[in-house]
Image (cartoon, rainbow, N blue to C red):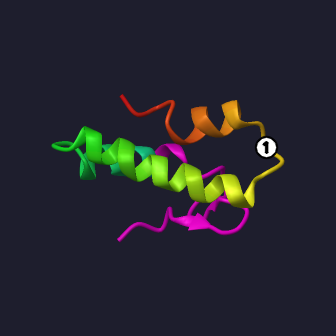
Amino acid sequence: MTTHGPVLPIWSCGGCGGPWPCETRRRELRAEFAEGRVSLALYMGAQLARATEDLHWTPAGILHRRFLGWVR
């Protein structure tokens, strides 16, 4: 179980305090979804939708890069 989960509603990392998903959580997610990259993209898309409601003042492009820009 990771300590790098999101702290809501500010979407910071519970493990290191950075913006969630932090680099550590991204590495963990890549490993967890190694055989399911589409599933990772769908999961992160759902997290983006949730975060958009809480971080409504943040430009959409920034949130997109943060939640999906690193998913390949």
Query: Dividing the image into 4 quarters, which one contains the C terminus?
Result: top left
Q: Looking at the image, which residue is at 63% across and 68% down?
A: 7
Question: Do we see residue 14 in this rendering?
Answer: no
| Magenta span | 1-24
Q: Is residue 4 above or below residue 59?
A: below
Q: Is residue 12 left or right of residue 22?
A: right
- What is the count of numbered marks? 1
Residue 18, given in percent of the width and then of the height, sits at 66, 51
- Residue flagged by tag 1: what amino acid is it? Thr
Q: Residue furthest left?
A: 35
What is the secondary structure assignment of the residue under circle 1?
A: loop
Depth check, front residue: 46 or 66: 46
Name the image quarter holding residue 67. Answer: top right
Q: Is residue 27 above or below residue 61?
A: below
Q: Is residue 34 left or right of residue 57?
A: left
Question: Do we see residue 64 in this rendering?
Answer: yes
Q: Residue furthest right?
A: 57
Classify mark 1: residues with Cα within 10 Å, few (<14), some (14-19) or many (20+).
Answer: few
Residue 31, given in percent of the width and then of the height, sits at 26, 47
Main secondary structure found in the magenta portion? loop
Q: Is residue 30 above or below residue 56?
A: above
Is 59 a magenta residue?
no
Depth check, front residue: 46 or 37: 46
Residue 55, given in percent of the width and then of the height, sits at 75, 54
Is 21 a magenta residue?
yes
Depth check, front residue: 22 or 47: 47
Q: Which residue is mark 1?
A: 58
